Image (cartoon, rainbow, N blue to C red):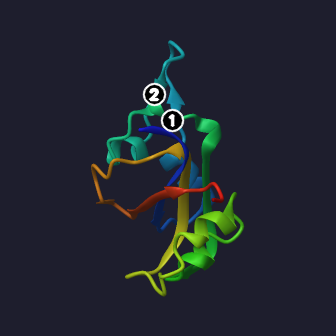
Amino acid sequence: MEQPGMVSIWLGNMKTQNQLEKYVNLTYDEDGESVPSNFFSDFNIDMDEIDEDFIEKAVLKEKSDKISALLEGCSYEESILAEFRGYKKLNKLYNAVILIYNYEYENLVNSREDFDYIASTSYLQC
């Protein structure tokens, strides 16, 4: 649900940035109405609760099981990583990240296809 100051994080695996864009980006029908992407459908996300301008996504060159490497360079990196200090390694290797700011995912679906929901956390410094 829409929640100012929160970011929801998914990690996954994609071959290319273009493939990730196609998976996440909304499309529009002939009437100009937005059509949910596979990502929104896979995780049962109501696209009316999301502002497209607050979605950040990237495919990295190398797979990693370290959240610090996967989130390196993202907006609010220091604040977000502070919430994951106790994490040493994830359970698997990932090369793609999706972050949705001002949104707290309700964990309706934990994993789907090549992506796993990781957490929702504050991106604002205390």
Point 63% across, 59% down: residue: 126
Comparing 44 with 60, the one in front is: 44
Comparing 105 with 31, the one in front is: 105
**Residue positioned most to the bottom:** 88
* 21 left or right of 108 in image: right
What residue sits right under mark 2 in the picture?
48
Point 33% across, 60% down: residue: 113
Where in the figure is residue 121, as x and y percent of width and height?
A: 49, 58
Q: CA distance from mark 1 to mark 2?
A: 6 Å
**Residue positioned most to the front:** 126
* 68 left or right of 2 in image: right
Comparing 86 with 108, the one in front is: 86
Task: Kindly state the secondary structure of the residue where label 2 is placed.
Answer: helix
Q: Quadrant of residue 125?
A: bottom right
Task: Kindly state the secondary structure of the residue where label 1 is placed.
Answer: loop
Point 45% across, 27% down: residue: 48
What residue sits right under mark 1 in the picture?
50
Q: Looking at the figure, which quarter contains the N terminus?
A: top left
Disc 1, disc 2: CB below 8 Å?
Answer: yes
Where in the figure is residue 17, as x and y percent of width and height?
A: 62, 59
Position of 31 relative to 116 (above/below)? above
- Amino acid at the residue labelled 1: Ile
Where in the figure is residue 15, as x and y percent of width and height?
A: 54, 67
| Crowd tier of the residue under label 1, counting other residues whose Cα lies within 10 Å: few below 14, some 14–19, many 20 or above | some
- Amino acid at the residue labelled 2: Asp
Point 62% across, 52% down: residue: 56
Where in the figure is residue 28, as x and y percent of width and height?
A: 52, 25
| Crowd tier of the residue under label 2, counting other residues whose Cα lies within 10 Å: few below 14, some 14–19, many 20 or above | few
